[in-house]
Structure formats: structure tokens, C-alpha cells
Image (spheres, grey):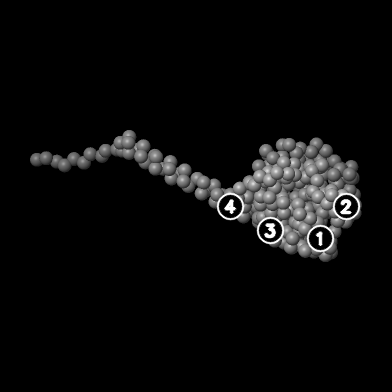
């Protein structure tokens, strides 16, 4: 009497290689899609960060009768603002450098933290785009007199600059401006996502005689982290930046909305000069 015996046989080498090949092919197909999805999610998060910062600046302005906080720049800090002026900085990032305010500053005491009611790790998360590698980008921007700016976003110093008042024709020093002075706020850049920020201000080096952006100084550029198209090469771009017209920066506008801007747009006076 014979018995039927079932024999379990494993996969052959060829079958295993076929399965591994199929898995590798699927991974190769899916990885770019997953990468795009992650980049898109980071762009949404960055947009949310910028919108919250805009909200904090606008809340400050509402409480202080239309005055924005100051832009917390490198030069304005080392030049020695009074303690009262220093309190108005939107971001307390400097560690040293002001004889009127000795010692390190506490980031958690920043005006932006006060009005958004966030501190510690949540504040750091708000101030950094997830696509911004702060370690790699900031190593070249260590400011020994004040510290290192380890954040992705800055504010327009033509609106928030403590020592700036008039338009680009005169560009003389003065005080911050009020919200009611800003013409066409739906066009005016208030919060910038910089490529390599070294302080809390975003500034356009403007040459009054020629009425053009000048490269005699180191201009602040917007980033291209969130660009959705190719990086267009344009001859004559400031400081050789080949991505001058490429939209890639999440920017907060003075009316509270956020939009993707290029350097070409941001350097147009209609976007950065509040008097136009």
C-alpha cells in the first residue's frame, strides 16, 4: 500500500533572483515618487511656518499701533541699540556683541515666540525649513561678534529695519515704518526664506544713482529649495546666480498670505519697497 508523501520544495535560485529583481524594479519606480511626495510635504510645512511668522508679526503690529518689530540684524545689534530697542527684535538670536545688552540672549524671549506662544523645540522647528541643512549652510556664516544665525527665515529690513525710513531714492536712516505706510501690502514681501541667511534681516542692496540692484555688497538671496521647474540660467544675474528667475522660496506677504517667489520678483522694488 503506497502512501502519498508531500514534499516541500523551496524557491530555486532563478526564482529568487526574479523576485528580487521585481522588488528592485518597484523600488526604483517608487523612490522618485516618494521623494517628490516628501519634498511636497516639506514645502507645505515650510509654507505653514512662514504663515505663522507673518501672523506673529501682524499680532505685534496690532498691539503696538501699527509698528512692526525690528529686524534683528547683525549691524544694528553691534552698533548698540538701547535695551528698549533691543526688546523689539522679532528674533533674539544674537549671543553677544551689544555693549548695552551684555551676555547671551534667550531665543525663547523673541517677540515672535511671545505672540505665537511657542518655546523651545517647537520654536526651533517653526524657524527652520526641513529642506534647509542648517549645519552645512551656516558653517560659512559664523559671525564671531554676535554668534551664528541657524534659521531659515528673515524679515524685510525695508519694513522692519530699526534705522531705515525713506524709500530707495534717499535711503537715509530713520525708524521702522507702520503698517498704514505700506502701499499695496498684497505685493510687499515681509518674511523671506533665504538661501544662506547670516542674520535676522533680508535686504536688497539698492544703488540710488542707477536705480538698480547692486552687487557691490553681498546681497541676500531667496532660496530655491521648493522650485518645481528647472533652474533657468540667465547671464548677468547678481553675483553669478544662475537661478535668478526660478521660483523656490516660500515668502510671507504683508497682507498675511504666502506665495512662492523668485529673486527676480523679490528684487523688483514693487515687492520690497513699502513706499511704492
Q: Is residue 172 above or below residue 146?
A: below
| Foreground tag (2 vs 3) | 2
Query: Sequence-wise, which precedes: disc 4 or disc 2?
Result: 4
Q: Residues within 10 Å of mark 1 (few under 14, many from 20)?
A: some
Query: Sequence-wise, which precedes: disc 4 or disc 3?
Result: 4
Q: Nearer the viewer, residue 28 or 80?
A: 28
Q: Residues within 10 Å of mark 3 (few under 14, many from 20)?
A: many
SS assignment at label 4: helix
Query: Sequence-wise, which precedes: disc 1 or disc 2?
Result: 2
Q: Residue at x 61, y 48 (%)?
A: 230
Q: Which mark is residue 171?
A: 2
Q: Position of residue 102 (x, y in %)?
A: 86, 42
| Foreground tag (4 vs 2) | 2
Determine the image quadrant of residue 132: top right
Q: Which mark is residue 276?
A: 1
In the picture of the structure, the residue carrying the numbered disc 4 is 40
Q: Position of residue 130 (x, y in %)?
A: 63, 47
Determine the image quadrant of residue 145: top right
Res 105 seen here: no
SS assignment at label 1: loop
Q: Nearer the viewer, residue 9 or 255?
A: 255
Q: Residues within 10 Å of mark 4 (few under 14, many from 20)?
A: some
Q: Nearer the viewer, residue 236 or 178?
A: 236
Would you say the residues marked 2 and 3 are in contact, meaning their CB atoms lie under 8 Å apart?
no
Q: Which mark is residue 258?
A: 3
Q: Residue at x 67, y 55 (%)?
A: 260
Q: Is residue 168 above or below residue 150?
A: below
Amino acid at each position: 500500500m503506497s502512501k502519498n508523501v508531500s514534499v516541500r520544495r523551496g524557491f530555486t535560485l532563478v526564482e529568487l533572483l526574479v523576485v528580487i529583481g521585481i522588488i528592485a524594479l518597484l523600488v526604483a519606480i517608487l523612490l522618485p515618487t516618494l521623494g517628490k511626495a516628501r519634498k511636497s510635504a516639506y514645502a507645505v510645512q515650510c509654507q505653514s511656518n512662514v504663515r505663522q511668522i507673518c501672523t506673529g508679526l501682524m499680532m505685534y503690529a496690532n498691539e503696538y499701533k501699527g509698528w512692526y518689530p525690528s529686524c534683528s540684524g547683525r549691524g544694528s545689534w553691534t552698533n548698540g541699540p538701547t535695551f528698549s530697542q533691543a526688546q523689539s527684535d522679532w528674533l533674539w538670536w544674537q549671543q553677544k556683541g551689544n555693549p548695552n545688552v551684555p551676555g547671551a540672549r534667550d531665543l525663547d524671549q523673541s517677540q515672535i515666540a511671545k505672540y505665537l506662544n511657542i518655546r523651545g523645540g517647537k520654536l526651533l522647528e517653526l524657524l527652520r525649513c526641513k529642506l534647509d541643512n542648517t549645519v552645512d549652510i551656516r558653517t560659512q556664516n559664523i559671525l564671531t561678534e554676535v554668534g551664528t544665525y541657524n534659521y531659515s527665515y528673515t524679515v524685510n529690513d525695508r519694513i522692519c529695519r530699526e534705522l531705515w525710513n525713506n524709500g530707495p531714492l534717499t535711503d537715509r536712516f530713520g525708524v521702522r515704518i507702520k503698517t498704514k505706510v505700506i502701499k499695496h501690502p498684497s505685493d510687499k514681501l515681509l518674511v523671506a526664506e533665504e538661501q544662506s541667511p547670516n542674520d535676522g534681516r533680508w535686504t536688497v542692496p539698492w544703488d540710488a544713482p542707477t536705480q538698480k540692484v547692486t552687487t557691490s555688497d553681498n546681497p541676500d538671496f531667496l532660496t530655491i529649495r521648493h522650485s518645481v521647474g528647472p533652474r533657468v540660467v540667465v547671464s548677468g544675474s547678481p553675483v553669478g546666480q544662475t537661478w535668478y528667475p526660478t521660483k523656490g522660496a516660500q515668502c510671507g506677504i504683508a497682507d498675511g498670505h504666502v506665495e512662492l517667489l523668485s529673486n527676480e520678483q523679490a528684487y523688483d522694488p514693487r515687492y520690497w519697497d513699502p513706499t511704492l
